[in-house]
Amino acid sequence: MLMQTHEARLAALRQELKARELDGFVVPISDEHMSEYVGAYAQRLAWLTGFGGSAGSAVVLTDTSQGTGAAIFVDGRYTVQVRDQVDEKLFEYRSVPKDTIGGWLAEHAGKSARIGYDPWLHTQKWVDQVSKQTARKGAKLVPVESNPLDAVWQDRPEPSSAPALIQSDEYAGRSSAEKRSEIGEWLKAEGHDAAVISALDSIAWLLNIRGSDVDRTPVALSYLIAHDDGTAELFIAPEKVTPELTQHLGNAVTLRDRAGFPDALAGLKGKSVSVDPDYGVAAIGQLLEGAGANVCFNRDPTILPKAIKNKVEQQGHRDAQARDGAAVSRFLHWLEREAPSGEIDELTAAAKLRAFREEHGDLRDLSFDTISAAGPHAALPHYRVDEDSNLTIPPGSIYLVDSGGQYPSGTTDITRTVWVGTPDGSAQPSAEMKDRYTRVLKGHIAISRAIFPQGTAGSQLDAFARQFLWAAGVDYAHGTGHGVGSFLSVHEGPQRIAKSAGGQAGTDQELFAGMILSNEPGYYKQGAFGIRIENLELVEPREVEGAEGEYLGFETLTFVPIDRKLVEKSLLTPEELQWWSDYHKRVFDILSPQLVGDDLAWLERECQPL
């Protein structure tokens, strides 16, 4: 009989821990590749707790004599969601980064407690940090050979067996052989014999392959060892290998069973091996060190070249954005017609947007779960609608939709915030809504128009977007921009536009021509409304008359009308008004050949100067 309640699941896990002589266990949302999105087989935290967010961890102790004996840790994005989905009688709520797993264990675990962790689901950095915190109380982190939660998860899904797919050079712009040769040269220059590549999007980029093993990210479950002579070993389940894949990879890439990866690491005795500290899980380093390899922690050598798109990838993004923009524009026109009736809910809207994308062809998946947020839900930046939270879009309110598609030529990500009127047209946005919306728009324009010297990091641009909100005494609690892949991860490093406080990853990364970033300032009034305007931007060389040194700017890639009903025109400068006119002229030029009839008439109306 399957365990249906989270209470029963928690009890079964505690029994398994006792049988293994463990006093506790850490359960993260993670897989063996430290992926942002993980397959159903790796959704251990959701199975145990009911939490459906994309980031979080839980700690379970066997001793429940003081409180629940368990805690769930999430960041500010999920403060509301975790309380809706997780029973507080079973798990204490803890807020990251204020609360830490190590700190909680130091406070709650008994002296000499043995706390288990799965070394295939954590980095060595995490292990070292938590070990240091727990050691102060005499508790000890213990790596497990097999995950105890898997032993009690009776109906756990199997990892995907879908075949790996080929990403042709038509879209990739460079051959896998060329990329592997470049990595080989890097290894020689750094004095390494090999690099373990475990991030799934890095493997996909390096070998020009894709897959369907993880929702929203087109990757194939695998590991890769790259050697200094440009050859590589790909560890992948045999059922995922097709004759076409074998031919595509050629003789320089040896295919091995994914199950043989740990033994292959043991075979690198005496070699100098590079491992990424953020994507290489602790088990990789532990196996290599146990075998006598010299482990060196360096950033995955594919990450920067993957982030700097070549000319073919750049054009692929433009093509994908044009197709996507037409679909999103048709959706916004549909929404303007239908939502004032009060009969459209968040799920219906998200499904309709996907349908428009599918009609425009070549859509392989969404790039993330659509944020379809009505009224107060728009004030939750990372809200995800489900059957329980689904809200009818109220006439006379703000609606926010953040969505994207995965196309063979590129990955899209766009947010539009619109005013939903009433059937008689009488309802109008408040002065506060228009003020906040226009300040967000001004920040968006400031990023789009930015010119900056080579060597500038994303953190140095972040205040450009926030300055107009700060002037009104308000701010937003998320980054302004993230990197985006080419038919890969919608959140791709290493570049970011965000505050550098707290050492956020990527904020100190220099921006290079060819990188793609989102431009998405926002404003959120809890319980009332939320605003975000997002386009994707391509970093490009910028000619500046009399410039002393090399300068960069942004080419906008996303073209969809920005809602004009929420704009307070008096707050915009002549330069900002000109940006609006120039942007919307480009929107019309790019999208009008794809639209007809009422959709085309709507586009023409929405693209007029303010």
Image: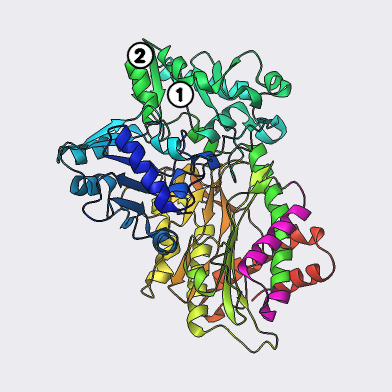
From the top left corner, tell me how far across and down residue 37 is, in percent.
Answer: 51, 44
Q: Magenta region, mostly helix, strand or loop?
A: helix
From the top left corner, tell me how far across and down residue 130 is, in percent.
Answer: 26, 39
Q: Is residue 39 visible?
A: no
Query: Residue 291's mark?
Result: 2
Q: Is residue 478 left or right of residue 569?
A: left
Span highlighted in magenta in the image: 336-362
Asked if residue 357 is among those painted magenta in the image, a careful observer would answer: yes
Count of labels shown?
2
The residue lying at 63 percent from left, 56 percent from top is 558
Q: CA distance from mark 1 to mark 2?
A: 15 Å
**Mark found first going from the N terminus, 1 or 2:** 1
Tell me if mark 2 has few (under 14), some (14-19) or many (20+) residues whose alpha carbon lies within 10 angstroms of its own.
Answer: some
Q: Is residue 536 above or below residue 294?
A: below
Q: Amino acid at mark 2?
A: Ala
Q: Is residue 242 above or below residue 562?
A: above
Query: At numbered mark 1, what does the secondary structure look like: helix, strand or loop?
Result: strand
Farthest right residue in view: 597
Q: Nearer the viewer, residue 272 or 55?
A: 55
Q: Is residue 227 visible?
A: yes
Q: Is residue 51 above or below residue 32?
A: below
Q: Amino acid at mark 1?
A: Val
Q: Which residue is mark 1?
A: 196
The residue lying at 28 percent from left, 46 percent from top is 101
Mark 1 or mark 2: which is in front?
Answer: 2
From the top left corner, tell me how far across and down residue 195 is, in percent.
Answer: 45, 22
The residue lying at 24 percent from left, 49 percent from top is 104
What quarter of the picture does the C terminus occupy?
A: bottom right
Query: At numbered mark 2, what does the secondary structure look like: helix, strand or loop?
Result: helix
Q: Nearer the viewer, residue 374 or 470?
A: 374
Asked if disc 1 and disc 2 are in contact, CB closer than 8 Å, the reply is no
